[in-house]
Amino acid sequence: MPQMVELIDVSRDYGDVDVVHALRHFHLRIEQGERVAIMGPSGSGKSTLLNLVCGLDEPTTGVIKIEGIELSRLDDDARTRLRREKIGMVFQTFNLLSTLNALENVALPLRLNGLGPREAERRGRILLERVGLGSRMAHLPDALSGGERQRTAIARALIFQPPLLLADEPTGNLDSATGDDILHLLDDLHREFETTILLVTHNELAAAYCDRIVRMRDGSVLREERLLKTGAEIEQ
């Protein structure tokens, strides 16, 4: 299988005097279509990892590749284009624009990529219907529930059918029932779009939807666990 994400001996340090080693000689390979959960305590380097993978941060040492493209060889404009074309992002805090309604938020990535408003909104309506928000398209984020805002954020992340989806604690601000609904939705959409998913979570249930769990501590891989096809057991 081709590699979607590859990190080779990646380290990320912050500070000049009191240096913080956010990542230490980190290796990770994610195959196309695979779902990988990153788990670990606060400060273990999970958020740093996501920022590096999406090109918002640069490693101190090591190599990061997305679909074989080495991020360090790209300038800022090329990294922005890569995020717009290849990487969808879902955040714990939703990050919806408060002045845009659900449809406008979902259509925005297509508009930024130069698609006309009529076609962008047509595609946005289709995806909002798909995530169960057909009757909520004209609502601003403040008029949506937490679960509806996260569904909107997921639709926005998938509107251009990116090969890679990064999800940072997508159920973290939701109650358990709504969180379960979001996990089922992501599972359905993964099968439909065949999107590679890199999920950062503290939630063992969320991780159980993935093919593999990478547990981190102090910026390093503590261990990896591959989940069996049944989802009932973990193969150490």
Image: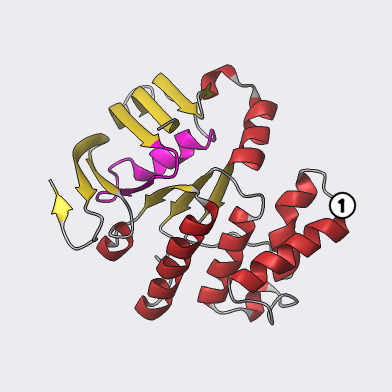
User: From the image, which quarter does the N terminus lie in?
Assistant: top left
Residue 178: x, y in percent?
A: 43, 77
Residue 173: which quarter of the image? bottom left
Residue 34: x, y in percent?
A: 39, 45
The verdict on residue 181 being magenta is no
Which region of the structure is painted magenta?
31-56
Image height of 204 relative to 33, above or below: below
Image height of 163 relative to 100, above or below: above
Compared across the picture, whether 209 is left or right of 141 comes to left
Compared across the picture, whether 67 is left or right of 203 comes to right
User: From the image, which quarter does the C terminus lie in?
Assistant: top left
Residue 61: which quarter of the image? top left
Task: Please state the total of marks drawn on the protein image.
Answer: 1
Residue at 77 percent across and 46 percent down: it is 112
Image height of 226 relative to 77, above or below: below
Between 139 and 228, the one lying in front of the other is 228
> Element under label 1?
loop
Can residue 121 be seen here? Answer: yes
Between 61 and 229, the one lying in front of the other is 229
Q: Amino acid at mark 1?
A: Gly
Residue 16: x, y in percent?
A: 38, 22
For label 1, the residue is 116
Residue at 57 percent across and 17 percent down: it is 73
Compared across the picture, whether 5 is left or right of 125 comes to left
Compared across the picture, whether 100 is left or right of 165 comes to right
The verdict on residue 55 being magenta is yes
Color encoding of the figure? secondary structure
Residue occupying the far left of the picture:
236
Residue 76: x, y in percent?
A: 65, 27
Residue at 44 percent across and 30 percent down: it is 2
Can residue 21 be seen here? Answer: no
